[in-house]
Amino acid sequence: MEIEKVKILEIDDSLKLLQPSRAIEIKTDKGTAESPNRCATSYEYNRKAELPTETTIDNPVSVYTKKFTGKEVNDLLTTNIEYGKQLQAIERVDRVTEYSILHVSTFQLYETSQSGKAPLELLSEGDNLNRFLKFLIDMQYEAKHDIISIPALNLPLSKLKNTLKDAHDAIERLGKQSLFSFDLKYQNFSEILEYVTTEFHTNLINLVYRKKRDVPQHYEFLGKFARKDVAFLMTDVSRVDFDHDELSPMHYMPFLGNDLFAIEIPPPAIPKKGALKKDRNIANLKILNKNELTIEPLIRSQITRDQILQQLGNPSNDDLDIRLQSLEEAKTDNDKYKVLNALTRIQELKVSTSEFSILGDHVKERSSKDYVKSKSKLGDRLLKI
């Protein structure tokens, strides 16, 4: 699918001391999506498959996020197997997200490595960076993507500009669109953002989430794009902000100059050899409280079972209700924990998506302040972020 147009629908600057919040329209050849909105991730599609009931994921935008380890980078550069493995992962997600109006892949590199060289260290050797990018472009082209993603690269500014220009030219020769990713903590963030929007006239940019307290100047710079037809997709958004009363960071991001949001995907749990089996911590099972926009443990939530099931779409069988009644059993029963974890993630996705739709209506009516007033303590918390 191609992005045909990005159009600003409305800008709401009624909340003083905050960035203007905005509603934008992203038109593709499959339909139109509006922001602010939550993207469904491959992780959430996988959790949906683990629920013993029928439910749907109806988010118009979906994102596949892949973060390369040093070993994966090395294997991609030195073996034949890794290319096919990564291509199959992309195609597998493409199949389950085929009805999305906009679906993109995004890529990152781990900063360090548990063994061997870190990804960027490997890519700094010889012609490895160009080879790596060519493999990424080739596999997305082979997956029949119209939007081809280039990962966030922590390179010196001049080298990064040259690298992105070479990649953009190669993608353009294929008749495809480029999607550039930038880490919000990149030292020359404002310069590189100006460069790609001016040089390539790109209308969608992927940003890797960082806390505002760590990069306040970069968040402030995003405000300069409020009235430009450029959409910002923020990936790797933390699920909980423990510094601000367990707020959901995704739900205050629209007030910091962003449009589309995808949650951070948990790293795979790798059991340690010889480690004794421990009870699962059911306090890690958390849901979204829409009244406060906080992420809270299921075991101390005031949200009733009936409300949770209603938020999931009132599944027809009673199995999920039975699971919710037996939370304590999930400590020692991995199957029950797995289902409850899937349930909480899909509840969060659905409630979160609904809240973005409500906020979007307020933005279009220039009444975001009324939305903020409707959420307990949100106004005071926003001023402290």
Image (tube, rainbow, N blue to C red):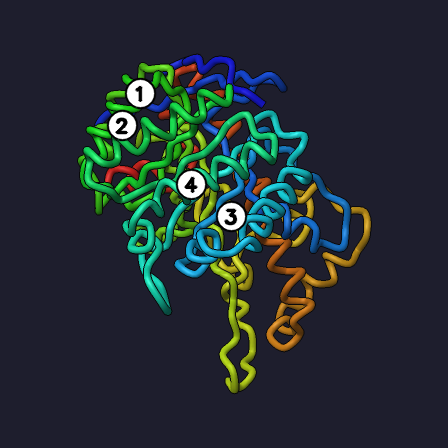
The CA span between labels 1 and 2 is 6 Å
Res. 18 visible in picture: no
Residue matched to label 3: 288
Mark 4 / mark 3, whichever is N-terminal: 4
Of all residues shown, which one is farthest toward the right?
317
Is label 1 in contact with label 2 (beta carbons under 8 Å)? Answer: yes
Residue 80 higher or lower than 260, as above or below: below
**Quadrant of the rendering where the N terminus is positioned:** top right
Q: Secondary structure at mark 2?
A: helix
Mark 3 / mark 2, whichever is N-terminal: 2
Q: Nearer the viewer, residue 254 or 316?
A: 254
Res. 222 visible in picture: yes
The mark total stands at 4
The CA span between labels 4 and 3 is 19 Å
Mark 1 / mark 3, whichever is N-terminal: 1
Task: Report x, y in % for residue 250.
Answer: 42, 40
Residue matched to label 4: 235
For the residues carrying marks 4 and 3, which lies nearer the camera in this image?
4
The CA span between labels 3 and 2 is 33 Å
Q: Nearer the viewer, residue 225 or 193?
A: 193
Query: At 69% from the left edge and 64% from the top edge, which residue is drawn?
Result: 325
Query: At 38% from the left edge and 20% from the top edge, which residue is drawn?
Result: 202
Check disc 2 and give the amino acid type: Leu
Check disc 4 and give the amino acid type: Thr
Viewed as shown, does residue 228 lie left or right of 174?
Answer: left
The CA span between labels 2 and 4 is 16 Å
For the residues carrying marks 1 and 4, which lies nearer the camera in this image?
1
Task: Report x, y in % for residue 323.
Answer: 70, 63
Task: Report x, y in % for residue 260.
Answer: 45, 31
For the residues carrying marks 1 and 3, which lies nearer the camera in this image?
1
